[in-house]
Amino acid sequence: MIGEQRGTTTADAWDFAVELRSDPATEEARTAVLAKPAFGQSFTDHMVVANWTADGGWQDPRVTAYAPLKVSPAAAVLHYSQEIFEGLKAYRHADGSVWSFRPERNAARFTASAQRLALPHVPEDAFIGALRALVTVDEPWVPSADNGETSLYLRPYMIATEAALSVRPAGEVLFGVIASPAGPYFDTGPKPVSIWLTTATIRATPGGTGAAKCGGNYASSLAGLAEAVANGCEQVAFVDAVEHKWLEEIGSMNMFFVYADGRIATPELSGSILEGVTRASVLELAADLGHKVEERRISADEWKDGVRSGEITEVFASGTAAVITPIGRVAWPNGELTIGDHSLNYGVGPVTAKLRSTLLDLQYGHTPDDKGWLTRLT
C-alpha cells in the first residue's frame, strides 16, 4: 500500500456540521490566554473530526466540542504509529480578517504523508474547508493584530483508529483539526539560539519517512534534543544516515547558511528532509531580494570552516512554528563556534532580519500579497 492513494473522494462530501459546546471558555479565561499565548499549551473550544472506513469512505465531518478522543487500546496508531499531521497558522490582519499562509502546500504535503503512511486521501478543498470551519467557529481565539508575533496555530492530523493488531494499513481512520493560540516558539523571540551538532543520533534514513510529516520522525529526534540540552544547547542539528557528514535538519526545522558574497544555501531535499513550507517561501523571497539561492549538499565541516574563516556570516533555521530563527552558536563534542556579530541587533544578522521581517509582513498583511500566498479563512 506504500505509495498508493487510499480512499479518494470529492470535497462535495465534506459539509461540516457544527455542534457548539455548551460550556465554552469564559471571555475572561480566553482573554487571559490571548494576553500571553504559549505555544501549544492552550486550546480553543472546538475541534474538527471526520471518520473514514475502508468500506464507507469519509463520514460525518463536523466541528464539535474540544474533548479527549475515545480510542481503543488496540488502535493501530498506538502500536504501529500509523499517523500524520500538519502545522500552519491563522493570522489576524489589521481589519479584523483572518488569513492562512499557503495552506494548499500543507494540503499537498498532507497528501504525500498520507500516501507514505498508507492512510486515506483528504482532498485539498476539504483540508482547507476544515481549517475555515474551525476558525469560523473559534474566531474569537485568534489573537489581536496588535499583539505582536501571535497567531492561532492549526494542527490537522490523521490517526489509524481500527482496533486490530495485524500489521497492515488500518481500515478505520480519524481526521481532525485542533487549534491553539500561539506566541513565539522560542521564549527568546528572534534572539539567536544555540545548536548541538550530533553524529551520534540519526533522525531519518534514505527510503524511510524523513520527508513525511509523521510523529515517528519527531520521536526519533528527541534523544538528540536531550543530548543538546545536556550540552547546554537549545536545539540539535542532524546529519545524514550514510556518511554522517551531510547536514539535514535542525530539530523540526530546515537550516540556511548566508555567505559573505550574499549567497544563501540550504541542504537539498534528499528524501529524508521535510520539505518545509517556510523553507520554500524563504528560497523565493531571498531570490526576490537579490540573493543567489542554492539547494545542495552542505557538510558539517563546511559549516565549521565557513564560520571560522568568515565565509559564512549568518545561519538561521526556518519552520512554521519558529518562523525564522537565527543561530548564534554551534557546539559539538570537541568544540564550539560563535556565529556572526552578536553586538548588533541582538545577534540577528542583517540578511536573517530582512528575510524574517519580509515574511512576517506578508503573513500579517502589512505588505501586499503579490504572490497570492494568503487564503482568507474569515
Image: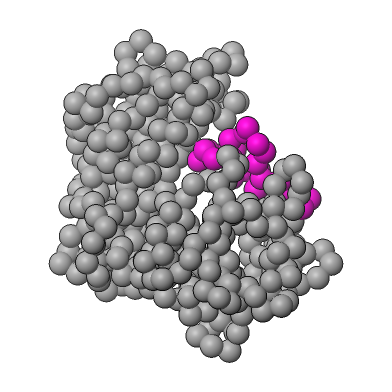
Location of residue 36 in the rendering, given as x and y in whole percent from the top left corner? 39, 69
Please say whether residue 3 is visible from this viewpoint: yes
Query: Residue shown at 54%/40% (left/top)?
Result: 211
| Residue drawn at 74 percent across, 53 percent down | 245
In the depicted structure, whether residue 204 falls above or below residue 229: above
Q: Position of residue 260 (x, y in %)?
A: 58, 77
In this view, the residue in front, 285 or 4, is 285
Q: Main secondary structure of the magenta part?
A: loop
Q: Nearer the viewer, residue 312 or 40?
A: 312
Corner quadrant of residue 101: bottom left
Residue 271 lies, in percent from the top left, at: 58, 39
Q: Residue furthest bottom?
A: 343
Note whether 176 is above or below 252 in the view shown: above
| Left or right of 241, for residue 156 | left
**Magenta span covers which residues?**
199-225
Determine the residue positioned at 24% across, 70% down. Answer: 367
Q: Is residue 245 left or right of residue 125?
A: right
Q: How is the image coloured?
A: one colour
204 within the magenta span: yes
Above or below — where is 163 with respect to 78? above
At x 74%, y 56%, the residue is: 198
Name the residue nearer the viewer: 358 or 156: 358
Q: Single out the residue that lies furthest toward the top.
A: 55
> Residue 206 in magenta?
yes
User: Residue 20 location, x and y as percent?
Assistant: 21, 40
Q: Using the rendered image of the protein, determine whether residue 314 is visible from the camera's viewpoint.
A: no
Q: Report the number of numbered marks.
A: 0
Name the residue nearer the viewer: 98 or 41: 98
**Farthest residue, direction left:** 95
